[in-house]
Image (cartoon, helix red, strand yellow):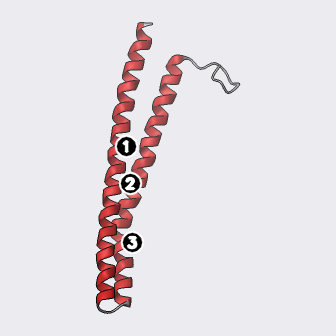
């Protein structure tokens, strides 16, 4: 049994299910990263420009500086999510291959 009252799942099927879930999670992280890249490239600069234009002197410059730092932080976070997604895919592939090989031996 699969622990949920359903039919029994073979080890081979479970390997496929686990691998698909890991890939799906990696894709979710990649989607989040792409959204952060988009925000950092277009939405944030436009918003910060509107704010900067609303203020004069040092206040406007202060907003510009904070916006630049925020953009860098968004890019860094997106890069981290992409790296995590790549590592998840790589690890999932290694585990998948090892488990498939182990099942073949049994």
Name the residue located 45 percent from the left edge and 35 percent from the top edge: 22
According to the picture, the residue beneath numbered tag 1 turns out to be 85
**In the foreground, 83 or 11:** 83
For marks 3 and 1, the one nearer the N-term is: 3
Q: Say few, some or many: other residues with alpha carbon within 10 Å of mark 3 (under 14 / 14 to 19 / 20 or more).
A: few
Q: Say few, some or many: other residues with alpha carbon within 10 Å of mark 1 (under 14 / 14 to 19 / 20 or more).
A: many
For marks 2 and 1, the one nearer the N-term is: 2
**Cα distance between the residues tagged 3 and 2:** 15 Å
Name the residue located 43 percent from the left edge and 54 percent from the top edge: 32
Above or below for 100 versus 31: above
Above or below for 62 versus 36: below
Q: CB of mark 2 within 8 Å of CB of mark 1?
A: yes
According to the picture, the residue beneath numbered tag 2 turns out to be 33
Query: Helix, strand, or loop for circle 1?
Result: helix
Q: Say few, some or many: other residues with alpha carbon within 10 Å of mark 2 (under 14 / 14 to 19 / 20 or more).
A: many
Query: Helix, strand, or loop for circle 2?
Result: helix
Q: CB of mark 3 within 8 Å of CB of mark 2?
A: no
According to the picture, the residue beneath numbered tag 3 turns out to be 43
Task: Indicate left or right for 54 with 3 as reference.
Answer: left
Residue 8 horizontal/vertical position (percent): 63, 18
Residue 23 horizontal/vertical position (percent): 43, 37
């Amino acid at each position: 049994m699969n622990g949920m009252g359903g039919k029994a799942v073979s080890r081979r099927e479970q390997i496929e299910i686990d691998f698909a879930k890991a890939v799906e999670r990696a894709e979710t992280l990649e989607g989040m990263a792409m959204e952060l890249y988009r925000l950092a490239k277009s939405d944030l600069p436009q918003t910060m420009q509107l704010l900067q234009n609303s203020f004069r002197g040092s206040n406007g410059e202060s907003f510009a500086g904070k916006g630049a730092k925020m953009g860098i932080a968004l890019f860094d976070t997106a890069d981290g999510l992409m790296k995590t997604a790549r590592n998840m895919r790589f690890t999932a592939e290694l585990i998948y291959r090892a488990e498939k090989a182990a099942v073949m031996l049994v």
